[in-house]
Image (spheres, rainbow, N blue to C red):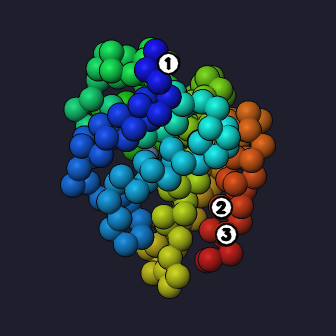
Amino acid sequence: MIPPVRLISEAAELAARRHNGMARKGRGNEPYINHLAEVANLLATATDGTDAELVAAGWLHDAIEDTKTTREELAQKFSERVASLVVECTDDMSLPKAERRRLQIVDAPKKSPGAKLIKIADKVSNIGARIHSDPSAAERDDLVDYTNWAEQVVAGCRGGNQWLDKTFDDAVRTARASL
Ligand code: ZN
């Protein structure tokens, strides 16, 4: 077992290297690592620092989907559970976007408790990045579309952590109030 502080700091470092140079979607062209830091921190807060593997998986949740990182590598460097959590949060990128989105809604209730929390934290972060102070019509449409879809995914993930459920609801409320 890797000590918890090392587990998380090594996950953060690997994520920073693998996502280097990528920008996140939404406001201000922020570096992708900001999204991963936000998701990891939401998970650390939600679980009050009691689940290092979950926080490490938060740092790494997009690594298989968006970078050359494999399940085997994560299992070997971190743990079997960290690898499984990341796999559960990985979409099949060979499918068209509409189908990937549909599958996220259908598959959400079948996910493990930890993966459900990562999914909710991911949606909180992605909604937040889409809120603009003076949105264009396209930005407005994107926020409406993303928030409506995220609500359907999160409906299948709720109930594991009250604080995270509430944080998601607050993000949705803030998003709709910004329109
Ligand atoms: Zn993400």
Name the residue tied to disc 2: 171
Mark 3 vs ligand 1: CB below 8 Å: no
Residue 24, percent from left and from top: 36, 58
Which of disc 2 and disc 1 is earlier in sequence?
Answer: 1
Instruction: Report the side of 166 relative to 154 (left or right).
Output: right
- Of labels 1 and 3, the one closer to you: 1
In percent of the image, x 32 and y 60: which residue is there? 31
- Of labels 1 and 2, the one closer to you: 1
* Residue 87 picture quarter: top left
Name the residue tied to disc 1: 81
Residue situated in front as seen by the camera: 31 or 52: 52
Name the residue tied to disc 3: 174
Give above or below for 64 relative to 66.
above
Ligand 1: give its quadrant: top left
Residue 13, percent from left and from top: 31, 41
Residue type marked 1: Arg
Give above or below for 74 relative to 16.
above
Residue type marked 2: Ala
